[in-house]
Amino acid sequence: NYSVGLKLGEQVFLFKDFVKLMHKNGFEVILDVVYNHTGEGGEKGPTICFRGIDNEVYYMLDPKNKRYYLNYSGCGNTLNCNHPVVKEMIIDSLRYWATEMHVDGFRFDLASILGRTPDGRWIGDFSLLKDIAEDPIVGKLKLIAEGWDAAGGYYLGQFPEGWAEWNGKYRDCVRRFVRGDNGTIQELMLRIAGSPDLYANRQTHASINFITCHDGFTMRDLVSYNQKHNEANGEGNKDGADENFSYNYGVEGDTDDENIIRIRKQQIKNFFTILMVSHGTPMILMGDEMFRTQKGNNNAYCIDDETTWVDWTLKEKHRDLFEFVKKIIHFRKSHNALKRECFYQRYDKFGNLVTDITWHGVNPFEPDTSYHSHSIAFMISGFDPVKGVRIDNDIYVILNQWIEPLKFVLPPLYGQSWYRVVDTAQEYPRDFLDVPERIEGYYIAQPRSTVIFISDAQ
């Protein structure tokens, strides 16, 4: 009965109770907010609120003809976020949700618009974005930006200190690598290492790493469709992104072919594993852990039926995938080496340049970063050279997206051994071993697989 009850203010009390219940059960509440446009649309839209109050203050208008709107949002109008009046309104709104509703943070839709001047120029550190980060109330919460907009603005890595960002470059690079594209290895190394090219002036949690989100394909559809299938949206399949870096492995959409289903699930396990061993903050889409599909619809915001609902029977039907995802999340949470707040290359207390990660190929310390390479391995040290103490096991990861098996010689540990934990090419339950098995010398990584080893020293 949210928002439709007869009692005055009932929706407010219900939301507050919801937040209290979430907090009681250990969940934070991040509110997805849209301050980039309103429902008044373009010049042919209705007059509901701001257009009638002061059109020129609240909206970005075409300087050549102020009857028309600048449409950076893709929704007909663009809020004039850096006008003093609009700034105050947005910050007051955020403070309300923080102080009255007690949410823990905000994810800002098309947040680059909040950094644009009335004529559309990007001013980043001198914009509303900076004011939000420095606000004594809102600035203490989690601030997450979608760092692009519908007019080509793409400002990833350029948000002020205090902001985290959806890392779209991480998403696209990992998708392309897993699909088998050429020329991905060098960028993949950056993305796994926390994208220091983007966030070196912030801590690693500023990079929100993800493969899928509420916009676009689900992970199952990412490995089941070569093209989008948005016919049900009523726009002639013209809406939604055309390039998804997806691959169907032989059949477009659902199939009964067990071999195709197996490789699709294997690739999903690869996605989850890469995500959980990458530096930064991992984000997953609800339902991906149980093989949820939207039948190829990558813009299903307007669909309210089984396409977008969560079918909870999938959890048991695809128990193998669900258990793997649960365990790989636990693996990340259990290993401090994967949760460092600083980047891997830094200076110790003596001023020496040290690195917590080393890169490898089929032979130790010989990574193949060439254009046609489809594999890479890396070792994350469990020793913290700055603190001078061991904080974790050493972790060694093999990524093989080549179409043939590859023999990887394991780096020597000198008095220790490597133990295999994960091999995504193995069937459940051997894809994730609760009791890791000792491996000597080398390991054959199967095609399109990810393998994780840990050392026996901690």
Image (tube, rainbow, N blue to C red):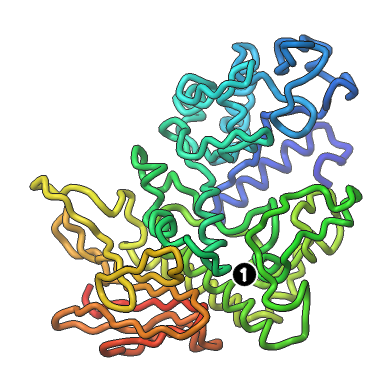
Of residues 83 and 61, the one nearer the viewer is 61
Q: Nearer the viewer, residue 411 or 280?
A: 411
- Tell me what residue is drawn at x 63 percent, y 81 percent: 319
Residue 364 shows in this picture: yes
Left or right of 362 in this view: 49:
right
Look at the picture and state if 191 lies above or below 13.
below
Q: Which residue is mark 1?
A: 289
Q: Is residue 271 above or below residue 150?
A: below
Which structural element holds mark 1? helix
Is 445 located above or below residue 355 in the figure? below
Judge the density around disc 1: few (<14), some (14-19), many (≥20) Cα neighbours within 10 Å: many
At a point 65% along the width and 64% down the height, the residue shown is 246
Camera-side residue of 334 and 342: 342
Q: Specify the amino acid type for callout 1.
A: Glu
Q: Quadrant of residue 56?
A: top right
How many numbered tags mark residues here?
1
In the rendering, at what x and y percent does residue 321 appear?
60, 77
Based on the displayed image, in which of its 4 quarters is residue 221 positioned? Answer: bottom right
Left or right, 412 with respect to 447, comes to: left
Q: Residue furthest left?
A: 350
Horizontally, is 100 left or right of 312 in the view? left
What is the x, y in percent for residue 355? 22, 57
From the top left corner, tell me how far across and down residue 37 is, in percent.
73, 28
User: Which residue occupies 78% across, 33% down?
Assistant: 75
Q: Quadrant of the C terminus?
A: bottom left
